[in-house]
Structure formats: structure tokens, C-alpha cells
Image: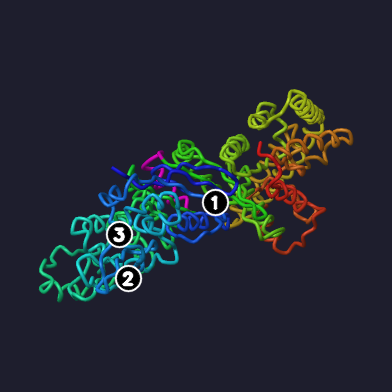
Amino acid sequence: MYTYKLTRIIFNNGLELRPGNITVIIGPNNAGKSRALKDIAWKTTQDKPLQGIVVTDVEWTSPATLQEIRDVYNVERYREENGSWMFRTLAAELCQEHSIGGGGEWPDWYEQTFPNFLINKSQFALYFGRSMVAFITTEHRLQLVKESVSANHEKQEANLLQVLYNAGRDVESHIQKLVKRAFGKEIKLDFTGLQRLLLRVGDSFITIPEDPRDAKPHLIKYEKLDEQGDGIRSFVGILTALLAIKRNVFLIDEPEAFLHPPQAFRIGEFLAEQANSSRQIILATHSTDLLRGILSKTTDVTIIRIARQNQTNSFHTLDPNHLQQLVNDPLLSSARVLDGFFYSGVVVVEADSDARFYHTTSNKLRNDIDFHFVKADNKQTVSRITQTYQHMGVRCAGIVDFDVLNDRAEFEKHFESWKLNNDEINLLLSIRQKIAEAAKYIPLDDRLESVTQKLKTLLSSINEIEGKENVSTSEKAKLLKQVERQANEILASTKSWKEFKEKGRAALSVELKSEFDILWEICAQKGLFINPCGELESMLVQQGISYTTDKKGWITSALNLLPRLEVNENEYPWKFIKAIQEYLLDVNQPMT
């Protein structure tokens, strides 16, 4: 038995995709996701030659004879009163009727000329493709199940509600259950007006009489779906299209449009369940919730990520099993790693405060680029997440503090996805070793003296409070907070890397500064950016915020100051974030 399927989609860079049951197109805004669907729709339903912008060609299965199509699909022509043969069906967008005449007698003339339809793909698309392909756009989404006229004759299907009416009670019941699960409301087709069809919304329709004459006074009390929010109208429209229309290819642009995250997840589940060997679904989305919904039901899915730089598209096929691991991994899922696939670039940082600071700084420097900032919780996880993005073809940079050079094993983890030769690896490790040894040479006496002074200051604060009478609760709370901050500073003073964490590159000798610059440049070329100032809390020293171990207090002061700062690309943090932006925006830079 003949089945209409898309067998090959060719993108503008030559990439050939052989779509399976469900294909998901993802990527940042304005990358070409919606355009790809429009190109596919045009090439499968139109006879006018059009140069595809994102998709250059589409191929599909061809029947051997006209009768093979007639046996499976509704492609029959009907003689009009004037004697001409006409074909009537819903247009690809499902919002209005499409009719086409021409040709000769049905089916004789079509059988004779059928070999020409197989040779000329645009003619096949015009005469037959429009009855096999549905294109659900965001533009037409809310019109799909609007109140409409009833059919004039038994074969007419000029709107989606007429199709739903003809599909029968079981299809309506299925849609009703899915809507109830997602929105807590039921829908019901109201055809009691005879000349009009519409959907009603309510908590339950179980008591509605079956006879339309008896049902009318009851149904009129329920609100119309047309008067509900865009979310439920969009949701019902997609369900109705997939369940009531017998077409083999569904192109859906942003199924999550107008939906809250839980409903986007539900529609993803539904689409995954509807795709099968006789029905292909190709959709474009910008929703991680919808993608999670699909992956929760199947890994038999083709995922294409489209990106664009300077009017040039790039395409990368993602591994659905790998994506499912991201969804199921508690750490990566909570860090919103999956969201990064919908941005033009990703920056992975150690902690939430880093993400907030660098995101704000990046937007201040340039507000015309969309980067996603992901917190990794610690520097050990930065390499794991950056490698995940690089493996999936997403441009990604990692930011780590200067003390990543303190631990050789930790530093080496970042090499795993880099294409380095032995000489480069040995050079990096040699420089790291020199810096680590320099940190150890801070005299013990100096560290001990620093700790002693800080302890004296702390004890002085405590003694001051003890000498007072009737100490208030607020003073005690203030003292405890002060003790906590100073205790952290005392702990940091005992460690050999204290000065390096506080000053970074500035704590090195002149000779080591030059060697660090070599190491920094090699790492930056691979997407790893080592904070040359030390820790994040050293980044605004030039702007008047001193280094402190009070991270919460520092980030509050920093975020308050940043909007008032003037951008100076020769100073930090602008100099640092500019280097990261240039790396992520450089499309000629090979992914490691």
C-alpha cells in the first residue's frame, strides 16, 4: 500500500536529511527554523518555482499509478453543475478551503498524464500534495477551531470543525480527555445551531443530552472556546488537526506558542505519540519544555539545530540519546543546560553569582547578541558542560577562576575535548606547574602574621560587644555576620593561593606574567577563559569595589554598580567579556 512520505530534505549548505517519524528543528531566534518549514511547505504543495532560502529541495515517495493514491487518499474530483471537474479540500494551513480545476475528465485524463506528474514534482505538489501535507503556522493557529459554518453537503470539509464533525464522537472524546489533562477543562463540539459549528468549554458535559434539540438550551450556557485564552485555543487546534485530519505530513511551527511550560510539555508528549510510520511530523520550536515532552516519550527522533551568522546557516544533527541524558541528569537539568541549544552561544561559569555578573556585563557591552549563561556549581563541572555543548555543535565558552591552575588534574580535564599535540600539552602543564610553585613560595611567616592580625581584629570586635550593657538583637546579628566574614578571611589567609585568588595575574613575577599570557591565549583559543584578575570578587577593583570573601555582599554591590559604569574596553571586566564575545561570534573559529 502506497504511503506518502518525505524521503529527503536538502539544506542550503548541502546537508541531506532523511526524516523519520518526527523531526525537531531547534536553534536561536532568527536562525531559519520557521523559514525551513515554509520552504518545505512550498515545495510540497505549490507548483510555482521558488528558490528555497534554508531548504533547497525536498523529495518524497511516489506512487506507481493514480489508483494507488485513490485507494488510500482523498484525491477524488467531483463534477460541478457547470460540468467542470473540481477538487476541494482544506488548504495546507487548514483555515480555508482549497479548490483546483483544470485538466480533463476524471480519472481518465489524469491516468493518461500521470507519468508527467511523477516527472514534474511541482505539478504533483499542486494536484496531490495539498491533500497530504498540513502546515500549522503561528499566524493561523488561533483560527483553526474558530466558530465556522456547517457543511453544505456531505463531502464538504471547508474548515477544521467540519472535519472534526465528520471524524466522529471517538475523536472528539480523545481530544476532550487531552484538554482536560492539560487545562482541567473539557471541550465539546456544539452543532445544535445547525448552520454553525463551534466548541464549548466547561468543567463537564456528561449530562448534556445526545439529541441536538434537547442539548441546545444546556450548551448555550457554556462559554465558547473562541472567548477563551490563546493557550487553550492553540492547544485544541493542534489536537484537532492531528486527530481529525488524515494527512501524512504535518509541519508545525512553534507548537508551544501561547502555552505555559506544563502545557508545552504536554503538547510535546502528544506529538511524540502521534508520529508513526504512516505520519511524519516536522516541527520548529524554541521551547525546552516541548523538547523535554518529546524526549520523555521517545528517542526515535531526528533533531536538527540551525544557527546563523552573517546570513550563513549552519546545521548540526543532535544525538537524541545524549539529549535525553541531559533531561534525566539532575545537575544538568537543574542548571538549564538544555536551554542553551536555543541560543547563538553559551557561557558556562562556576556559580550563580558568576552567571548574573557576566550576563549583566555582556549585555552592557553589547545588547544585540543572545548568549545563555549556565552555572555549573563548581569549576569541576564547567569542563563537563562545555564538552557537552561542543559535542552537540553549540558554540560555547567556559569561565574559571585563576585557581584552576592550582590543581593539575582539574586543569587537565579541560584538555579532553581539545585537539592538542603533546608539545602544547607539555607547555600548558609546565606553565601551570611554575605558577603553582610560585604560590607555594609565599613565606609561612607572612601568612602567620596575616592570620594573627585578622584574629586580633576579630577578638577586638567581640570584646567591644561584651563590654556593652543591653546589647540589642540587631547588634548581635551584625556581630555574628562580621564574625562569619572575618573567619572566612582568616581561613583564606592560611592558604598559599590567597594572594593569587585575590590578585590573579598581578601576583605573578614579570617573567611568569609573560608565560601566563601564553597559557591564557592557548586556552582562550579553545574556549576556556581563565579570570586573570583572580576570582570574580577581584573583577571590579579598578572601579572601587575591593576584593572580599563576602561573595553575597560583593555581587549585590557589583550588580548595583554595573549599570552606572561607563564601558572601557581596555579595563576589566569589559576587556575580559569582550574576548569571550569575540570568540563566540567568530564563525570561522573551529569548534574544539
Q: Is residue 312 above or below residue 297?
A: below
Q: Nearer the viewer, residue 2 or 193?
A: 2
* Dot 1: element: strand
Q: SS of the residue at dot 2?
A: loop
Quadrant assignment for the C terminus: top right
Q: Is residue 293 magenta?
A: yes
> Mark 2 = which residue?
146
Q: Which residue is mark 1?
A: 56
**Which residue occupies 38% across, 40% down?**
298
The range drawn in magenta is: 287-300
Residue behind mark 3:
240
* Image quadrant assignment for residue 475: bottom right
| Figure quadrant of residue 107 | bottom left
Q: Is residue 345 left or right of residue 333?
A: right
Instruction: Say which of 284 and 340 sits in front.
Output: 284
Badge 3 marks a residue whose secondary structure is helix
Rendered view: 405 above or below 273: above
Q: Position of residue 400 (x, y in %)?
A: 68, 40
Q: Is residue 327 left or right of residue 446?
A: left
The reply to whether the C-beta atoms of the residues labelled 2 and 3 are less than 8 Å apart is no
Residue 474 at x, y = what percent? 58, 57
- Crowding around mark 3 (Cα neighbors within 10 Å: few <14, some 14 to 19, many 20+) is many
Q: Residue at x 67, y 32 (%)?
A: 418
Tell me the crowding category of disc 2: few under 14, some 14 to 19, or many 20 or more residues within 10 angstroms, Cα based. many
